[in-house]
Amino acid sequence: MKRRLFIVGFGPGSSAFLTPYASSLIEAADHVLASDRIGESIGLRGMSISEISERLASLVEHDGFESVSGNPIVVLVSGDSGCYSLAKHLVSQWSEYYQVELVPGISAISYLSAQIKVAYDDAVLTSLHGRNQFIVPKVTYNHKVFALTGGANSVDRICKQLVDSGLGEVSITVGERLSYLDEKITSGRAKQLVDVPFDDLSVIYIENPDYALSHRALSDSDFVRADIPMTKEEVRWVSVNKLRVTPGDIVYDIGTGTGSVAIELARKADDGLVYAIDSNRQACDLTFKNLTALKAFNVAVVHGEAPEVLADLPLPDKAFIGGSSNKLDEIVGVLIAKNPQIRIVTNAVTLQSLAQAQQVFEKYQLMTEIVCLNVSRANKVGSYDIMVANNPVYIISGEALVRDDSDDSDITEGERR
């Protein structure tokens, strides 16, 4: 049998919140390795992930692969071993060499939840520590969000993101140095906390009572239209679903018009971002008005001419082309250059524009699907209901013939965002 390695959740920080079972393992262990700032609580030097790995490797080499001699080895990780913990990485790395066992602890999120008397069983939990994530989508579509902060995602930066996206009024509670003697809990609106310094490894609770329902499809009557063209709701719903958007996607809506497609896409990409692009300033202003009214704060409006304006935007996973100003070929070329695995959907209402889309998709060797959507609506004429047909719309979908998941292995999350 392999030597036993216990990965122990230490709790929020103070040794006072270490479970009795965890304490007994520490006392019995031959070797105790502590991560982060845990060491200061028990008189050990905190080690980096690489240092812990080096130490575990040296113990394997010293004791032998199948050694069962000696007491267990304990690695202390912050919080709970099952909640955004270093434990996941350690299990995948060392299960081949050790008999790994996980010991739960009190997470910093559950600790803050208890301190502010707010349950987290109906909240979204996330970690922004060491990740290039964007908090705005989670806050947009959820009433309650608990998040671990750290690194580039400091509390003040998170507050600035919320304010810049139109969510400055949401309430935030920040827990610093939780469970330590100098613990501090601060509450306020996002706009009030933008310039307030906080501890790097804080926990935040964000409450947005005016959150949007991401599962509700939107009707044409939900949008302000003015004189800007809009993709009608039945066509919009089919087009959006043909894009196969997943929650974390980065999506372009090129030729956004009223923003109707962008806002529908944002609800599908409810953990991602949508860029609503249009060369018409009036369309951009109208899109901003609609996204504000419909609380689609994970939509960024971009004024500019495609494809030129696409150069500085993050890498897209999906793209809808609602208007191309006779530049479909150039736009598709730029999209594929940015992401060879992108999925693209465009609409056509004339046979000429359909033929052009077919030619462009064929030129770039996209696997193409074409759907003709015919929609009729009942119209009251006297005491009768007569179905009145709208013009048929062609929905053209395309993606790479061969999808090679290794192609984007060098794309970092930061480049995507």
Image (cartoon, rainbow, N blue to C red):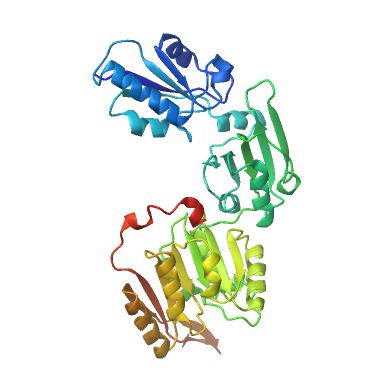
Q: Is residue 294 visible to us here?
A: yes
- Residue 96 lies, in percent from the top left, at 28, 29
> Farthest right residue?
192
- Residue 236 lies, in percent from the top left, at 48, 73
Instruction: Report the side of 366 relative to 300 (left or right).
Output: left
- Residue 416 lies, in percent from the top left, at 48, 56
Residue 350 in which image quadrant: bottom left
Q: Is residue 58 above or below residue 188?
A: above
Q: Which residue is at 63% across, 76% downward?
A: 283
Count of numbered tags:
0
Q: Which residue is at 63% across, 39% downward?
A: 205
Quarter of the rendering occupied by the N terminus: top left
Q: Which residue is at 50% across, 17% downward?
A: 19
Tell which of 148 and 411 is nearer to you. Answer: 411
- Residue 385 lies, in percent from the top left, at 50, 85
Tell which of 54 and 189 is nearer to you. Answer: 54
Instruction: Report the side of 45 relative to 174 (left or right).
Output: left
Q: Is residue 263 visible to us here?
A: no
Q: Is residue 304 above or below residue 5?
A: below
